[in-house]
Image (cartoon, rainbow, N blue to C red):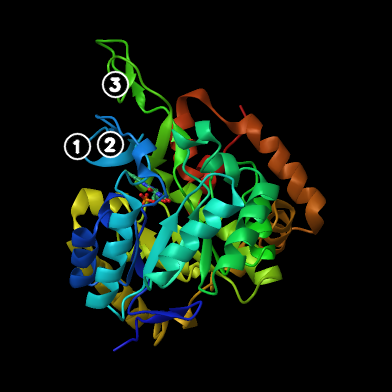
Amino acid sequence: MPDLSVCINGMRFPNPFVIASGPPGTNANVIGRAYDEGWGGVVCKTVCLDAESIINVSPRYAHLRAADSDEIIGWENIELISDRPFETWLDEFKRIKDLYPQRPLIASVMEECSRDRWVEIIQRCDETGVDGFELNLSCPHGLPERRMGQAMGQDPEIVRQVCQWVRSATRKPIWAKMTPNITSIVEPARAALEAGCDGITAINTILCVMGIDLETLRPLPTVEGYSEAGGYSSKAIRPIALRMVMETARLVAADFPTTTVSAAGGVESGDDAVQFILLGAGTVQVCTGVMKFGYRMIRPMLDDLRAFMDQHGFETVDEFRGRSLPYFTTHADLVARQAAARGAHGGEAQAAEAGSRDDRWQADRLVEQSRALSSQEPDAALTRGPSQ
Ligand SMILES: Cc1cc2nc3c(=O)[nH]c(=O)nc-3n(C[C@H](O)[C@H](O)[C@H](O)COP(=O)(O)O)c2cc1C
């Protein structure tokens, strides 16, 4: 029987699957349910000192559905952080830790760019017994207007400053949660790790516009006729999350080997999660998946993980963490490898052949030819057919 437990920044998780900050971790009742169903840990919905200023609207979600089924593949939200009073949260953190002392509870926190406020929120949460912190430097809507969330996470120097404040306030593990709405996730991630954070969470939601209602001509989700850009999550963002986790994990492996990555973005199955671990993630978080399928989705996820480990003979998660990371390289290296594999003499002949291939696209075979180039074993007749 493989051992699914992981020890991350000194916290022991019975399995690497963690509830991500959002509705599935938004009060003590739902957090208890997550532990009861078998989730390895919980990051609570983001809390702040003054919840009175947090005012949500509804509807606040909108969906992208697959063309051939009703399945939700993309999910937009314009939800803010928790609107529940900070004192209530402190009571609940204590209660949860009393009931589930062995299960990691990570407090997600967000504040304005003020040293006093960050230090206060961290110290008051710390006293309740939470196991660690996740800094929400990445919420893309609503709060950036107040210079919070993503507005901080997009500026590596502010990230560094906030992470230093937080580091001075607690000895517990700190994960800095990154925004994907940035040219290079590596810059703020590096700033956070240099400032003493123990890990990076990647990614928060991707800024999006879900669509326009063609009857009313109003954007979705429509609130009194209006909308705003929101955060995109669910299955559709997984490839982007994988790319950003890959980039973050490479940074960690190269320059901060004692720190960790917690992955999030479009995970719905154990196989999805395993891919993030293969790229170097220590834990894998799920938010929208739980909103689509409920807390019990953890059961098939654990079965998938066990089956994967059995198939490859892995006894611990550590044995395969990061296994796929070395297989990312440069385009030039791919060209050289393919030339070598095909027995071509040097890169020049190969490049000349590749350069001429775009002449071979044929209008009435475009769909077929595109499909062939997506196959791991491209049909030579289609990809290297006669020039027109
Ligand atoms: C409705 C909703 C609310 C969310 N609220 C928060 C939040 O309060 N704090 C936070 O850091 N991330 C929040 N997130 C982002 C998720 O934690 C996660 O990073 C993101 O949705 C990608 O993962 P997923 O595809 O599994 O949802 C929220 C996401 C959704 C869909």
- The disc placed on residue 70 is 1
Whether residue 83 is situated above or below residue 230 in the rendered picture: below
The percent coordinates of residue 238 (x first, y second) are 42, 50
Q: Amino acid at mark 3?
A: Thr
Whether residue 177 is situated above or below residue 184 in the rendered picture: below
Task: Determine contact: label 1, label 2, CB under 8 Å.
Answer: yes
Q: Which residue shows up at 62% across the image and 67% down it?
A: 168
- The disc placed on residue 106 is none
- Mark toward the viewer: 1 or 3: 3
Nearer-N-terminus badge (1/3) = 1
Q: CA distance from mark 1 to mark 3?
A: 21 Å
Instruction: Respond yes or no on whether mark 1 lies under 8 Å from ligand 1.
Output: no
Task: Determine contact: label 3, label 2, CB under 8 Å.
Answer: no
Q: Amino acid at mark 2?
A: Ala
CA neighbours of label 2 inside 10 A, class few (<14), some (14 to 19), many (20+): few
* Disc 1, SS: loop
For the residue pair 280 and 294, the one nearer the viewer reads as 294
Task: Pick out the residue farthest to the top.
Answer: 216
CA neighbours of label 1 inside 10 A, class few (<14), some (14 to 19), many (20+): few
Q: Which residue shows up at 33% across the image and 82% down it?
A: 310
Whether residue 180 is situated above or below residue 219 in the rendered picture: below
Q: Amino acid at mark 1?
A: Asp
**The N terminus - image quarter:** bottom left
Mark 2 sits on what residue?
66
The percent coordinates of residue 21 (x first, y second) are 37, 54
CA neighbours of label 3 inside 10 A, class few (<14), some (14 to 19), many (20+): some
Mark 3 sits on what residue?
222
- Mark toward the viewer: 3 or 2: 3
